[in-house]
Amino acid sequence: MVNTDLIGPMLCSKKAVEIMEKNGGGKILNTSSIRGWEHGGRSVVYAASKAGINSFTRTFAKMVAPLNIQVNAVAPGFVKTRNYDNMTKEQCDIFIDQTQLKRWVTEDEISDAFLFLTRNDAMTGQVIYVDAGFTLK
């Protein structure tokens, strides 16, 4: 999990900088999670990996800003994916009850955050939480 969720993005980012530097800049977008914010629920390794992505995003953004490269991340909340298909309504309600808006985040809302970051030239080192208010606890 650490290799996939943390080391992989770090290695891809390093390679992307080599390419972007030759092209005058660019944008690197990472995928984090609400589980990297405060605590990871039941998965310590997943939470640590995503917290690492958050720290990497901010630190790497500082390093590559002089190269006109922006680094940001999106941290999705609870998105109704196949992961929840085998859960009961009561089990799913436990996740939703942790959000302020009492609803699932949609896939479109997550993709909108990524698109926003591709269009914005003034943001770097930011983690955008698209979480229906989960992090407002």
Image: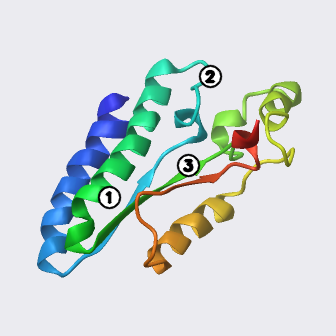
Mark closest to the chain's N terminus, 1 or 2? 2
The span from disc 3 to disc 1 (Cα, nearest Å) is: 16 Å
Residue 6 position (above or below residue 75): above
User: Which quadrant of the figure contains the C terminus?
Assistant: top right
Labels 3 & 1 near each other (Cβ < 8 A) = no
Mark closest to the chain's N terminus, 2 or 3? 2
The residue wearing badge 3 is: 75
The residue wearing badge 2 is: 41
* Residue found at x 17% / y 81%: 23
Location of residue 78 (image quadrant): top right
* Residue found at x 79% / y 34%: 98
Location of residue 81 (image quadrant): top right
- Mark 1 belongs to which amino acid? Ala
Labels 1 & 2 near each other (Cβ < 8 A) = no
The residue wearing badge 1 is: 61
Residue 115 percent across, percent down from the top left: 53, 72
User: Which quadrant of the figure contains the N terminus?
Assistant: top left
Residue 4 position (above or below residue 27): above
- Foreground tag (3 vs 1): 1
Left or right? Give the position of 27 relative to 35: left
- Mark 2 belongs to which amino acid? Gly
The span from disc 2 to disc 3 (Cα, nearest Å) is: 15 Å
Within-10-Å neighbours for mark 1: few <14, some 14–19, many 20+ = many
The span from disc 1 to disc 2 (Cα, nearest Å) is: 28 Å
